Image (cartoon, rainbow, N blue to C red):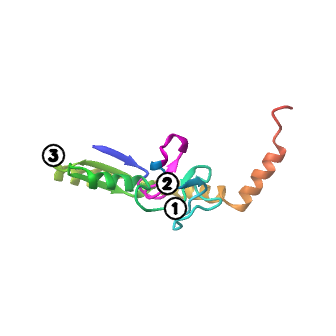
């Protein structure tokens, strides 16, 4: 069994590169530093993970975690099953279908693990609030003020 995370938005169908210089160019998507926004393929200023090298567009072959998993399953000689749960950026579990009791195992995983995953609504609302506040015009202004009044290292 193999567990995967980040198979949902934003990186299920979009690559993110922390060190693009380490990836051979033939395996890279066109990328640059820029934020992502739900429902928009192109990068945006002020979006989620703006400081990372994100693929310039969402979707297409060889772009994103979920796409990579699906392509691996399609090209593999082994019969795999992928169970997904798209809450909290997505969780996936892949296992061989041909193993004994694989149908029973898949049913157990869906019912006992994925269906019972609990997301505290307060935490979800807090994360949403922090994301919106971090990317607001007011937050940008406060960062500028902070930078002006921050004592320099030389003082």
Camera-side residue: 120 or 154? 154
Q: CA distance from mark 3 to mark 2?
A: 36 Å
**Among the two numbered marks 3 and 1 on one chain, the one whose residue lies closer to the N terminus:** 1
Name which quarter of the figure residue 155 lies in: top right
Camera-side residue: 97 or 142? 97
Q: Main secondary structure of the magenta part?
A: loop
On the image, the x and y values in percent for residue 4 come to 37, 47
At 62% from the left and 60% from the top, the residue drawn is: 132
Camera-side residue: 2 or 65? 65
Q: Which residue is mark 1?
A: 57
**Among the two numbered marks 3 and 2 on one chain, the one whose residue lies closer to the N terminus:** 2
Q: Which numbered mark, 2 or 1, is in the foreground of this view?
A: 2
From this viewpoint, is residue 108 visible? yes
Query: Is disc 3 surrounded by few (<14), some (14 to 19) or many (20+) residues within 10 Å?
Result: few
Span shown in magenta: 7-25
Q: Which residue is mark 2?
A: 29
> Hey, which residue is sitting farthest bottom in the picture?
39
Q: CA distance from mark 3 to mark 1?
A: 38 Å
Tags 2 and 1 touching, CB below 8 Å: yes
**SS state under label 3:** loop
Q: Which residue is mark 3?
A: 99
On the image, the x and y values in percent for residue 135 come to 65, 58
Q: Is residue 137 magenta?
A: no
> Hey, which residue is sitting farthest front in the picture?
26
Q: Which numbered mark, 3 or 2, is in the foreground of this view?
A: 2
**SS state under label 1:** loop
At 77% from the left and 56% from the top, the residue drawn is: 141
């Amino acid at each position: 069994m193999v567990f995967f995370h980040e198979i949902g938005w934003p990186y299920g169908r979009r690559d993110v590169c922390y060190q693009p210089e380490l990836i051979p160019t033939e395996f890279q998507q066109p990328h640059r530093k820029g934020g992502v926004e739900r429902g928009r393929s192109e990068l945006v200023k002020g979006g989620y993970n703006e400081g990372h090298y994100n693929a310039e567009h969402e979707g297409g072959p060889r772009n994103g975690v979920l796409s990579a998993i699906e392509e691996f399953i399609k090209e593999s000689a082994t019969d795999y099953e992928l169970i997904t749960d798209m809450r909290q950026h997505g969780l996936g579990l892949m296992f061989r279908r041909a193993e004994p009791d694989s149908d029973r195992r898949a049913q157990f995983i869906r019912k006992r693990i994925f269906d019972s995953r609990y997301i505290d609504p307060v935490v979800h609302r807090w994360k949403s609030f922090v994301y919106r506040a971090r990317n607001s015009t007011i937050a940008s202004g406060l960062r500028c003020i902070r930078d002006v009044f921050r004592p320099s290292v030389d003082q």
